[in-house]
Image (cartoon, rainbow, N blue to C red):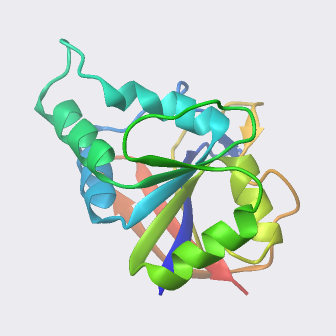
């Protein structure tokens, strides 16, 4: 049975914004290894459109960016959207019955399935489907933006913490 993990970078004041802060080389390598080890990823429309950046090679990329793109392209993806007419390679569109689809994936796959995007994660939290929350805490204060938790924070219990790279602490929580 697979675990559904919600993992994102977060500022000290609780916001997520992939453009406001990025990973150092050690954290980026961690993300490459993380993606390689996933059973798949679940995206909402907005986050999937952001991640489509990795579908095509860019001439300015170094070895690490190419490694991340290769790992991302290889993993299965499920995209929850009612508005996208089509999606890219190695992806499945999830339209109406998100709960049944994600529950089915958890039952049939082994390993970890990562969910990306606060709004989708909140919907899955409300359905009781998120098994773990991983906050990659960066020493940045944004002051506003999209919060990590898009709704009321569920009761959580800290399972662990570790430092990754120079400045980031990963906090792992499970529902209490």
What's the residue at 70%, 49% (across, down)? 118
In the image, taking residue 74 as reference, residue 96 lies left or right, namely right
Please state which of residues 22 and 119 is positioned toward the viewer in this rendering.
119
Residue 56 in picture, x, y percent from top left: 29, 23
- Above or below residue 19? Residue 158 is below
In the image, taking residue 109 as reference, residue 158 lies left or right, namely right
Please state which of residues 36 and 169 is positioned toward the viewer in this rendering.
36
What's the residue at 25%, 41% (across, down)? 68
In the image, taking residue 175 as reference, residue 133 lies left or right, namely left
Q: Is residue 130 visible?
A: no
- Above or below residue 37? Residue 59 is above
- Above or below residue 9? Residue 142 is above
Residue, far top? 59
Q: Quadrant of residue 38?
A: bottom left
Q: Quadrant of residue 33?
A: bottom left
What's the residue at 55%, 26% (across, down)? 20
Figure label count: 0
Residue 9 in picture, x, y percent from top left: 53, 46
Residue 134 in picture, x, y percent from top left: 54, 64
Residue, far left? 63
Residue 2 in picture, x, y percent from top left: 47, 80
Residue, far right? 152
């Amino acid at each position: 049975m697979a675990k559904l993990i919600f993992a994102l970078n977060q500022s000290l004041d609780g916001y997520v914004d992939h453009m406001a802060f990025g990973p150092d080389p050690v954290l980026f390598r961690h993300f490459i290894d993380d993606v390689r080890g996933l059973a798949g990823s679940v995206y909402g429309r907005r986050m999937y459109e952001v991640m489509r950046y990795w579908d095509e090679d860019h001439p300015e990329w170094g070895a690490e960016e190419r490694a991340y793109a290769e790992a991302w392209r290889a993993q299965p993806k499920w995209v929850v959207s009612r508005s996208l007419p089509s999606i890219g390679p190695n992806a499945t569109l999830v339209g109406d019955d998100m709960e049944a689809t994600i529950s089915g994936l958890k039952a049939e796959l082994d390993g970890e399935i990562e969910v990306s995007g606060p709004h989708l994660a909140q919907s899955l939290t409300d359905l009781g489907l998120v098994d773990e929350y991983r906050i990659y805490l960066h020493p940045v204060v944004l002051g506003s933006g999209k919060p990590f938790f898009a709704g009321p924070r569920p009761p959580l219990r800290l399972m662990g913490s570790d430092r990754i790279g120079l400045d980031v602490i990963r906090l792992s929580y499970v529902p209490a």
